[in-house]
Image (tube, helix red, strand yellow):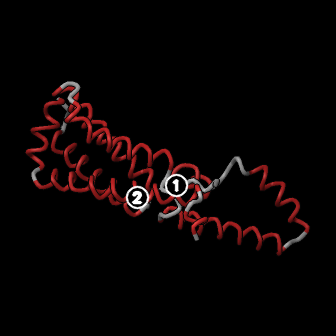
Amino acid sequence: MLSTILTKSFSKDTALLILRVITGTVLIHHGFEKLANIENFADAFVRPLHLPFPIFLSYIAAFSEIGGSWLLILGLATRFGALAIVGTISVAIYHALVTSGFNIFLLELLLLYFASATSIALTGPGDFSIDEVIIRILRSESEEEEVGQSSINPKLSNKKIITKEENSSKGGIFQFLQANLLSDTSN
């Protein structure tokens, strides 16, 4: 039991779970605060940057924080949720720098959110996520399909292996999801 807990993989996945859930839980209220008074948020944060459509962009910021936070908490399309948060927090950092200069008291929380979301976007959600469940289901279905194809025609099984290696660069939906959106399963 102790050796399982102390393994690098288990520790990394647990750390990512904690980072995802805490970041999402703490950040989600910022989105709800924006929605509570969207006009005030637009006046205070979007209009000073002279961005077009301040109300629309305020809704985008609020929903990206709420939706991105839920995606982080659940571990579903986690990298997409983390990137939504990174985008919103990047604009918030820019706003803080433009309006107040390098004021560490304004920037410290934003930089922590930015670092957390960027780390999650780069490393993926870990094994304790819905993304990992989806990727395992997709992997088992593709393995079942390969076994079914080779049992139908055993003479083609050698050709199937060769063409599988040749076509691995072409990929499919499984490879795209694994490489771009879902967790890192190369461990």
Q: Is residue 131 above or below residue 121?
A: below
Q: Residue at 33% of width from left, 53% of height from top?
A: 23
Q: In the rendered image, which residue does mark 1 sit on?
A: 12
Q: Residue at 38% of width from left, 46% of height from top?
A: 116
**Residue 122 image position (x, y, % from top left):** 49, 44
The front one of 187 and 178 is 187
Q: Quadrant of the C terminus?
A: bottom right
**Residue 31 image position (x, y, % from top left):** 22, 53
Q: Residue at 75% of width from left, 67% of height from top?
A: 146
| Residue at the extreme front | 2
The front one of 96 and 104 is 104
Task: Give the total of numbered labels.
Answer: 2
Res. 18 mark: 2
Q: In this view, does 34 lie above or below 151?
A: above
Indicate the amino acid at tag 1.
Lys
Q: In this view, does 151 lie to the left or right of 35?
A: right
Indicate the amino acid at tag 2.
Ile
Q: Residue at 51% of width from left, 48% of height from top?
A: 123
